[in-house]
């Protein structure tokens, strides 16, 4: 089972970014780091390396990597992509977050 899920819309957007930037062979890495107004924040990036302690899996054809420390905070998380009149970008829904900030990029657990 995957630690996180990507919606189909998020998977399409990630594939578009990989193709646009010429990053064949790269995976989407979701990471949790200290910081932000709620104590922890998300980092989304492309990575071409899978470490010894990483969990690697595929969701809707997109390779995804999560390090073991971040996985503890991310189990059950869904990454979506929103593009409407109010905003556009990746939206992270984390059932483990006990508090979030207004920007949606920072959380407490």
Image (tube, grey):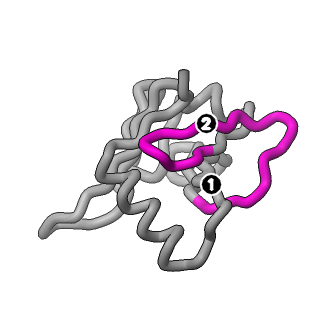
Q: Say which of 101 and 75 sits in front.
A: 75
Residue 80: give its label. none
**Where is the N terminus found, in terms of image quarters?**
top right
Q: Which residues are magenta?
A: 45-64
Marks 1 and 2, how far apart at CA: 9 Å
Residue 69 is drawn in which quadrant? top right
In the image, taking residue 82 as reference, residue 25 lies left or right, namely: right
Kind of element beneath mark 2:
strand
Looking at the image, which residue is at 67% across and 61% down? 25
Looking at the image, which residue is at 33% across and 43% down? 7
Q: Which residue is mark 2?
A: 57
Q: Is residue 60 inside the magenta stretch?
A: yes
In the image, taking residue 16 as reference, residue 45 lies left or right, namely: right
State whether the magenta stretch is mostly helix, strand or loop: strand
Looking at the image, which residue is at 62% across and 62% down? 46
Q: Position of residue 81 (x, y in %)?
A: 32, 55
Q: Position of residue 96 (x, y in %)?
A: 47, 25
* Callout 1–callout 2 Cβ contact below 8 Å: no
Residue 27: give its label. 1
Looking at the image, which residue is at 73% across and 60% down? 48
Q: Position of residue 102 (x, y in %)?
A: 33, 52
In the image, taking residue 84 as reference, residue 63 lies left or right, namely: right
Q: Position of residue 60 (x, y in %)?
A: 42, 42
Label 2: how many residues lie within 10 Å, few (<14), some (14-19) or many (20+)?
some
Q: Earlier in the sequence, mark 1 or mark 2?
A: 1
């Amino acid at each position: 089972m995957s630690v996180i899920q990507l919606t189909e819309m998020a998977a399409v957007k990630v594939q578009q970014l990989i193709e646009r930037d010429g990053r064949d062979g790269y995976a989407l890495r979701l990471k949790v780091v200290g910081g932000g107004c709620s104590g922890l924040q998300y980092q989304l990036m492309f990575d071409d390396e899978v470490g010894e302690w990483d969990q690697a899996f595929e969701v809707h054809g997109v390779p995804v990597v999560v390090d073991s420390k971040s996985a503890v905070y991310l189990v059950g998380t869904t990454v979506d992509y929103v593009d409407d009149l109010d905003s556009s970008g990746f939206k992270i829904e984390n059932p483990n977050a006990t508090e979030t900030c207004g920007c949606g990029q920072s959380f407490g657990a």
